[in-house]
Image (cartoon, helix red, strand yellow):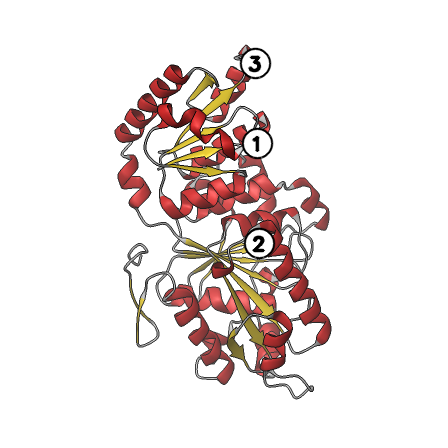
Amino acid sequence: MTILWDLDPTTTESYRFALGGSVEVLGHGHAVGRSIEEGGEHLVVIGPDVALAAACELAEQLRVSHPEVGVILLRHRLEVGVLAQALRSGIREVVQADDQAALADAVRRSEALTAQLGGTTMAAAATGKVVTVFSAKGGVGKTTLATNMSAYLSSTGARTLLVDLDLMFGDVAISLQLVPTGSVMDVVAMSGNIDLEGLKSVVTRHEPSGLDVLAAPSDPGDAERIGGDVITELLRVARNHYDYVVVDTPPSFTEHVLAAFDVSDLTVLVATLDIPALKNLRIALHTLDVLGAPKETRTVLLNRADLKVGLASSDVEAALKVPVVAEVPFSLSVPAAVNRGVPLVLEEPRSAVSLAMRHFVDHEVRQRFGETIQNGAKRSFTLLRSKR
């Protein structure tokens, strides 16, 4: 199926002859990216009224993450400057919008090139999954959950990368007692050319679990120098080399967090039994609805669920109007493990907290993405790549 990105959905018939077959009309670049991730389409035609900068940004992203996908740009007038910028970004051809014969020829050439690149095989190949952990309020245990989830995933044999996207005050490295050899800031210099070797040069290995960590910058001021497009490219490239990419986030909708949401296969929303946290999370859910994030890719986890504070999980579900899929109990072992810089799921695997987190990962992450769970730590893939 061909994707037509056009601001006017009624123009579909204008290009029906040239495009042929089934055409999916979408009105936003983020929706195009999600559709490609889910459906494996090989051709994107961008309408003449879509901004050139937005078209080029999408083409640059696809050139890295899905080089088999052809991008054809329609313009009302063909200009030398537009042609040069489009071709530099990876757009295969630029065609005048009212020239249907030229568009049909461009489509045939793009499909032939995709076939030469082995596009069908590449699109069908399994890619890693991006799991973003988010809460709209600080202090809910989000980083602890993200580090423990990542450490457990890695301990099962999955190639796992944990990205600290709290670019101003990230605590992932210190929570694991790591001295980072690089950070997200180092990726900026690679923008447009991020690859596996570049990733390897900036990640730090957590030896007890085999987890790779991409730390936040040590200077909070660096956050402003990291664009959302860098995060998008980083995560798209990382998912091609890891089975799981877990993203820890700050408690706010920064451009970096929005970029992570756009490429996430699952968003874990962390709730706690306090009114401010529930109020903020309800606002966050509404914001995700407005942004068009699919509801089926979200899941709510209730942390410190057994605290006696006058609220229960049923109150959380009533406030958020979504089900709570997992509850993690409170334990003083958690802050003690954080202070020692060790993931609780590895140090005390039989504790109630560890069992709850492992059950959540097994059933809400691993099984969701096609793994067959065998005795907890065993792994058998049906969708993901085989273990390292």
Give the tally of numbered discs.
3
Image marks 3 and 2: residues in contact by CB distance under 8 Å: no
Whether residue 333 is visible to the viewer of this picture, yes or no, is: yes
Instruction: Identify the residue position indicated by label 1 in the image.
Output: 54
Residue at mark 2 to residue at mark 1: CA–CA distance:
29 Å
Residue at x 38% of width, y 64% of height? 368
Closer-to-camera residue (363/12): 12
For mark 2, does the 10 Å Cα neighbourhood hold few (<14), some (14 to 19), or many (20 or more) residues? many
Dot 2 falls on a residue whose secondary structure is: loop
Q: Position of residue 275 (x, y in %)?
A: 72, 75
Q: Is residue 37 left or right of residue 325?
A: left
Q: Position of residue 205 (x, y in %)?
A: 47, 57
Residue at x 59% of width, y 68% of height? 270
Closer-to-camera residue (149/360): 360
Of the numbered discs 2 and 1, the one sitting upstream in the chain is 1
Q: Is residue 13 left or right of residue 220?
A: left
Dot 3 falls on a residue whose secondary structure is: helix
Residue at x 27% of width, y 30% of height? 115
Image marks 1 and 3: residues in contact by CB distance under 8 Å: no
